[in-house]
Amino acid sequence: MAKFPIPPEALRRLPPEHKLLGKSGRYLLERYPVWPMLDHLAHKTVPRHRHSVWYALGGIALFLLTVQVLTGVLLMVYYRPAQPWASIQRIALEVPFGNLMRSIHHWAANLLILTLFAHMFSTFFMKAYRRPREFTWLSGVFLLALMLAFGFSGYLLPWDELSFFATRVGITEIEKAPLLGSLLADLARGGPDVTVDTIGRFYVLHVTVLPVILLGLVGLHLLFVQVQGMSEPDSFAALPPERRRYSKFFAEFLFAEIPIWLFLGVLLVALATLWPRALTPEADPFAAAPENIKPEWLFLSQFQLLKLFPGRIEVVGMALLTLLPLVVVVTPFVDRAVPANRRGRITTWLGVLALLGLIFFTAWGWLS
């Protein structure tokens, strides 16, 4: 069998933690010549500046996503789409630590969405979407949209009163969208209204279709980040080379994130214990909707914004909600100036308005 000799200079350049792999590591390296990749990772650095704290959001999102996958797999073992409410009740009351896992899954999903929004806005304000990172930005935006789809599809699965009517309201709003709204709503419901048959569609989407897309998008996003490295803000790039400071990714930055992940683990257990995910009575499609029913907080801003466009002018609100994601997607191809010029300042102010609007409409919808 042919072997691939490891260049001695490549092994010398590897950091000490790679040399500790010993015989097993060398055994694999002889058969799979991946030392260029290891050499690249060994020399990967992270810029150190006053905004460096925002770099940790990517690792936090990855940690919360891992929690989601692990708890989701455990819940799948006991969940039955044919008996959704009864299976959730069994998980909550009979399965050891079942309600804890379900509550951790719930809180990790909320914190993950919150982290991704913070990650997107911090990336936006640091202008990290500019050349050559346009596709890194786009893959991140699509990941956020995918997480929102996860939240929407998973919210109905308990089939309790709250999730049923909130999902019905959400799909009704989708149906009002011009052109494809009615088609998308019928495709999601599997008919003219939300029924038990809708559970089957949402379950397949939540545990099969979306995870496959997620696997590819996360891999692509991480590949882009590893190849292109961390972005440097304009203020940092303008410094003389001798004044720029960097940290090694594996020796310093990654290890500094481990205490944050441990804290998040403790926080998730605390939230799940103190405020467990409630299970309201089983959904009755023929019952009247409770008063003041509204979507989950992830979609409250859109829901509240549409209230400003009642009746016939609601199509204006739907058009506005369609336009905003398009603006986010085309921003890297419009704001291409380095360092920031007038066009860059305009996009910054648009980002500030979008952030304030998101917070305002979400709070308004929550309190109304």
Image (cartoon, rainbow, N blue to C red):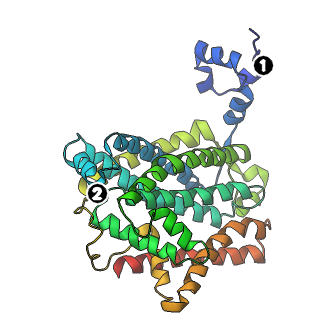
2 vs 1, front mark: 2
Position of 139 relative to 44 (above/below): below
Nearer to me, 65 or 20: 65
Q: Residue at x 39, y 66 (%)?
A: 194
Residue 84: percent from the left, percent from the top?
Answer: 31, 52
Residue 2: percent from the left, percent from the top?
Answer: 77, 11
Instruction: Say which quadrant the N terminus sits in.
Output: top right
Q: Which mark is residue 66?
A: none
Position of 219 relative to 110 (above/below): above
Q: Quadrant of residue 163?
A: bottom left
Q: Which residue is mark 1?
A: 7
Q: Residue at x 48, y 48 (%)?
A: 65
Q: Residue at x 71, y 21 (%)?
A: 11
Q: Which residue is mark 2?
A: 277
Task: Answer with mark 2 or mark 1, whichever residue precedes in sequence.
Answer: 1
Q: Residue at x 51, y 51 (%)?
A: 61
Query: Left of 250 or right of it: where is 152?
Result: left
